Amino acid sequence: MSQHSVLLLPGDGIGPEVVGEAKKVMEAVASLHDFGIDFSVADLGGVAIDNSGSPYPESTKELAKAADAILLGAVGGPAWDGLPAAERPERGLLAIRADLDLFCNLRPALLYPQLADASSLKPELVAGLDLLIVRELTGGIYFGEPRGIEADESGLRRGFNTDVYDENEIRRIAHLAFQFARKRGGRLCSVDKANVLEVTMLWREIVSDLASEYPDIELSHMYVDNAAMQLVRAPKQFDVVLTGNLFGDILSDTAAMLTGSIGMLPSASLNSESRGLYEPVHGSAPDIAGQGKANPLATILSAAMLLRYSLNEDAAAKSIESAVERVLDSGLRTGDIAAPGESVCSTADMGDAVVTALSAA
Ligand code: IPM
Ligand code: MG
């Protein structure tokens, strides 16, 4: 029987509630599929600042390096909004991404037919939507130096950041995007701003050069402003979208909204050894924290991605995904995915229903 180790980072806001449900589901699926998971738990984000003064404490770092995979809830909240940029909970998330070299961020946007009415677009535009955003996560303007806010002699302040990618950083994420396109619909759209920004001129050149190694993949390029427009005009034209850190941050929120509920969307952040950090795309939702209202499905689906990409337990991942489908079929809804007037279940009800659906399969 294989034994895996998973680090849980519940984090802030609704994080602990949704991670709790995902843990239940992982325990159930492990016993059904005959493998074991040793769980450990650590602090990241605001809770880490409160308990130990740093958003990414040394103790968390050690456990993160030792684990086969990490499941994160969410970080941040109004309690820490007043802190200077360098001390905010979000810095903990950026630090763990950089520390573990999690350069490959996968953000699928899948529309569940059961929830088609929840999309902000007309059902015919989104029916069957299934796209994957591959976002570079440890480079670009998020990490580029120099950065800062400085005053000149007269006291006039200027803020600045640096958008920078070297060829190797572009190549390693592009290779993965081509490979994901191969496992999916065979189409890759690389998004840049190569009409203005040199850094993305290089991006476009490197991605184009790799195309000869993937003759079976249909490669296209799109400027980011057009991509933003196309995502809300005709999103089904996309299969795999490859882009840098900042554009990926923005486009992935747009893609998420097309599916109707950001409460449904998982994500994976992987390094070159496929070790990874998995988290729901939604944030810490402080307005509903601790009330049992949060939708745990994005975290449960993140746990499925964790099983697939880091633990190599594909059958278990599929069991979770089909259990989620069956729960949606049964009509169970948390507030974020309920139609007006429809009755609403709690976070724990939803987690329990997935566990029941797993064993019923
Ligand atoms: C995301 C978030 C983060 C990001 C923040 C919380 C640092 O928006 O994961 O998309 O900008 O990458
Ligand atoms: Mg974001």
Image (cartoon, grey):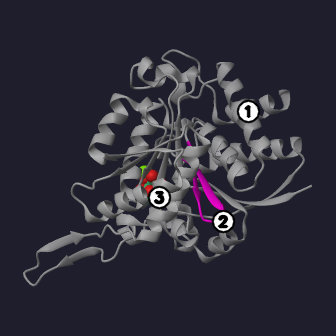
Q: Is residue 229 visible?
A: yes
In this view, the mark in front (3 or 1): 3
Whole-percent x, y for residue 14 in the image:
56, 46
The residue lying toward the viewer, choosing from 294 and 304, is: 304
Amino acid type of the residue tagged 1 in the rendering:
Val
Element under disc 3: helix
Q: How many marks?
A: 3
Q: Quick one: label 1 or label 2, which is nearer the N terminus?
A: 2
Side (left or right) of 360 relative to 311: right
Find residue 47 and report its image quarter. bottom right
Instruction: Note whether ligand 1 is within 8 Å of mark 2.
Output: no
User: Label 3 to label 2, Cα distance in Å?
Assistant: 21 Å
In this view, the mark in front (3 or 2): 3
Element under disc 1: helix
What residue sits right under mark 1 in the picture?
354
What residue sits right under mark 3 in the picture?
210
Q: Main secondary structure of the magenta part?
A: strand
Whether residue 107 is situated above or below residue 100 in the rendered picture: above
Q: Label 3 neighbourhood size at 10 Å, few (<14), some (14-19), many (20+)?
A: some
Highlighted range, magenta? 266-280
What residue sits right under mark 2 in the picture?
273
Amino acid type of the residue tagged 3 in the rendering:
Leu
